[in-house]
Image (tube, rainbow, N blue to C red):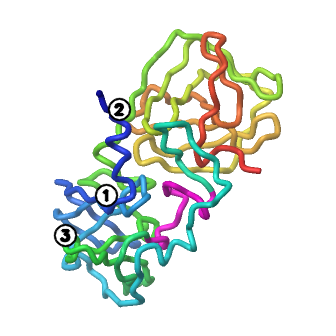
Amino acid sequence: MSTRLRHVLTGPLDQLRHEPIQKRIRATVGDTTVVDTTAALLVWEPKRVVPSYAVPTTDVAAEVVGAEPTATGARADDATEAPDAPNPPEGVVPMGFPLDGRRVYDPSIPFSVHTTDGEIVTLRVTGGDARTIEAFRPADPDLASHLLLDFDGFDAWFEEDERNLGHPRDPFHRVEAVHSSRRVRVERNGKVLADSDETVFIFEPPLPVRYYFPLAALTSELLTSSDTITYCAYKGQASYFTVDGEPDLAWGYREPLHDALPVAGRVAFFNERVDVYVDDVLQEQPLTPWSKRD
């Protein structure tokens, strides 16, 4: 019997996983380079869908100060399975729930939540931009000489000479932008928000497909710019829009990274919170961290 590949890829989510990367990785605080290594690992703690950089302690230009040991799950804020957590469709791994019931941890769960044995430590960076940065030393023998670092604790990260945004890039993650002439229509409360047969589909498993509309296809009077900005490691800096009174229901990339260049200047909506019709067929709303919660 054939095995669905999604099951193979998501099967180890409850395990500690790592992968060496052959890139020079640097991290800075102000003008000070605190991390500079060619021996970094990507590490996924159990339940994490996005990796952390793990670097040799010898490649960190800061004092490492021990804090406290933690057993598996001890920092997960009592993240037990909630009895009323919704069950996903068979074979589908949901992208997230409230913490007390999440089956997977998306990037909204802070670095301070750990799901494997190890020691919580801090880095003391001295100088004009002095600060402390959280780090974690896993107990696993394969990772014993490495420290997991809080990505957000640094001012900038670089893979080789390219700035990295949002979080470490996963070498097994793929973003595919495809032009389509299929008619896509987005509605909310019976109002048409966008309608076009010139959309760009972004395929980025395990995320749902996203539909990027040209500006001319939008019901512009229903969209107003928001102050919200987010960063994607693969697509770049996103700006958001309030749509028909619903905050941050849509977003776009003015200057996307190379993986997503075809969506420049286009706008997409959260499928989770609108009605999407493709060739007049209503699509099922996906379950992700951006779904509406009561």
Q: State the mark number for residue 142.
A: 3
N-terminal label among 3 and 1: 3
Label 1 amino acid?
A: Phe
Label 3 amino acid?
A: Asp
**In the structure shown, which secondary structural element does the residue marked by tag 1 occupy?**
strand
- The image shows residue 162 at horizontal and vertical percentages of 30, 50
Question: Which residue lies under the disc numbered 1?
Answer: 158
Question: Which residue lies under the disc numbered 2?
Answer: 4
Bounds of the magenta span? 98-114
- Tell me if I can see residue 77 in this picture: yes
- The image shows residue 262 at horizontal and vertical percentages of 44, 25
- The image shows residue 170 at horizontal and vertical percentages of 33, 49
| Nearer to us: label 2 or label 3 | 2
N-terminal label among 1 and 2: 2
Measure the C-alpha gap from mark 1 to mark 2: 35 Å
Reply above or below: 132 against 85.
Answer: below
